[in-house]
Amino acid sequence: MSEVLALTGRQMTHLRRTPEKIISVSLTPIAMVVILGYLFASVISVKGGEYHDYVMAGVFAQVGLACVGATALGVASDLRAGLTDRFRSMPISRASVLFAYTVADLVTAAAAMGAVAGIGLLVGWRIHGGFFEAVAGFALLLGFTYAMLWLGVLIGLAMRNMEAINGVTALALVLFSFLSNSFMPLRGLPGWLRAVAEWNPVSSVAEACRVLWGNAPASAGASLPVRHPELASVLTLGVLLAVVVPLALRAFRSAAAR
Amino acid sequence: MEFAIQAEGLKKRFGDHEVLAGVDLSVPPGTVLGLLGPNGAGKTTTVRTLATLLAPDAGRATVAGYDVVRRPREVRRRIGLAGQYAAVDELLTGRENLVLIGRLMGLGRRGAQTRAEELLDGFGLQHAAGRPSKTYSGGMRRRLDLAACLVASPQVLFLDEPTTGLDPASRITLWQQVREQIARGVTVLLTTQYLEEADFLADRITVFGSGRVIAEGTADELKRKVGDERLEISVERSESLDAAAAALGRAVSEAPVVDRETRRVAVRLVDGIGGVARAAAELERSGVPVTDFAVRRPSLDEVFLQLTGTGAQTKESGDE
């Protein structure tokens, strides 16, 4: 436990000294709020509400997606600096080192979501629901982000190369947020693509938040993620963590500098 | 515990490249073993295996009395590892780096702080202790790195090329700090490409080539293996080379080797100081003006090049 505290403290000191990290993970989401929620909002209409309400849940999920790259870069840079070797040559648990990355980056993500929420409120986004529903929505988003952070840890350990990590995670950010119901309802998609997009955890998380926040939930359909988005979110995230965490621990055991 | 570090038949293969082809090592407690060898000879892989970072494919090894594969945690409690680059956290200050390691090693918050101050004093880093370590010079980083692996007072220290890339002054400072640890009874395994470094720090030297040990001994033993002492003289003018060679030949009854380019004559010395005295007398009698007169032994560089010569050549023509 004291290991986790010491290592998390180290990460929090990093965050204090380089707060740019918060900006880097909130940049794309904020751009989406301004472009879609403000510039395009007047020409796009969704059933049952305002478009600037509709996009916000997906934009918050984008913060989580952006954290994949940020976490992977932090992990890879420790690996290259030889710090990972040092930690591995010490009598501490492997899990505590990786856990510390995810705790600290969850704080980064929460701060970034705060910034995104501020911009959202400026363009007119409001939560039309109860307090507990509002909190539940954010809790779900943080859960989603947490799964993404472990994915980032795995990618950082497995890929090492900074340029490659940047490329892959930037592509994943675009792919996962646009191949979902984040910015448009999925009604118009061809059947197979629609199934893929519906099962994308970003879709179920965003839809669950829209339901909780009264932000124009739009989907209609028969599949499980559409009918029970909150259940589908918890399910997909649980599976994701169950796969990614052991893989990350294994990668850490054999991780080598260079 | 007879040996602080012991390895038997360590093998490791990466893909179809055999990095360790059966390495045996034994280092008695409180001594320093220098691992010497060209790039790619397996020095770093050996260190990583002994420091529990890498599992060997075959063979066994114990460090501080514990098996590195079966009891890695016990080994990790007793070792310090300084890798090829200073593993310091650039965003943390020097002090924060040391406190972090202390807390991870279970010294507690207060204990870690006290230990950090001791090390900052001992390593001459107190003046920079509050600055992020990314502002440190190369020498300061290495010192901080060495201090970090000493936080928990390890019994065994692994130093993987500890002074690569340092200027001569920083190198000497670091050597002195390593020597202080040796004086305290710490066992050290040191890899290096600098023969001077092995000569200065190591009790015994193991020479690596293509994943195996190709020679082992003290620096003196290795030098003797390569060649005897020889007497070398230089003359002012090349016309007097033959007269000088004749004089040396009379003195030691061995055939002298003449190098016209550098105006030097060398001869093998078989009977020590007697030969030196006779050579001096013969040269004096022949009236040849001599500019340099010296007894030389092979340097570790010559040992290194002779022992690893073939390895280095295949490397050059190989795929690297």
Image (cartoon, coloured by chain):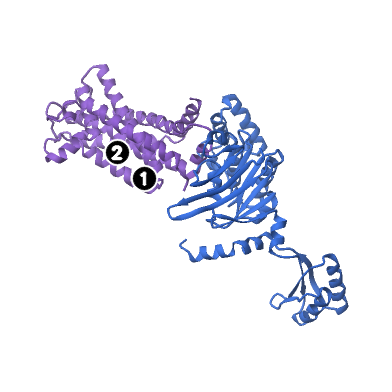
Residue furthest bottom in the image: B239
Q: Which mark, residue A28?
A: 2
Vertical position of residue A92 compared to residue B171: above or below: above
At label 2, counting other C-alpha atoms closer than 10 Å, the crowd grade (few under 14, some 14-19, many 20 or more) is some
Q: Position of residue A236 (x, y in %)?
A: 26, 31
**As shown in the figure, which amino acid type bears the numbered disc 1?**
Ile
Quadrant of the rendered structure where residue A47 is? Answer: top left
Q: Position of residue A172 (x, y in %)?
A: 28, 42
Which chain does the numbered disc 2 sit on?
A: A
Q: Residue at x 54, y 66 (%)?
A: B313
Q: Which mark, residue A165?
A: 1
Q: Is residue A228 left or right of residue A23?
A: left
Q: Which mark, residue A19?
A: none
- Depth check, front residue: B217 or B168: B217
Vertical position of residue A75 compared to residue B245: above or below: above
Q: Position of residue B39 (x, y in %)?
A: 54, 56
The tint of chain B in the picture is blue
**As shown in the figure, which amino acid type bears the numbered disc 2?**
Thr
> Is residue A124 visible from the viewing direction of this image?
no
The tint of chain A in the picture is purple
* Mark 1 secondary-structure assignment: helix
Q: CA distance from mark 2 to mark 1?
A: 17 Å
> Is residue A140 visible from the viewing direction of this image?
yes
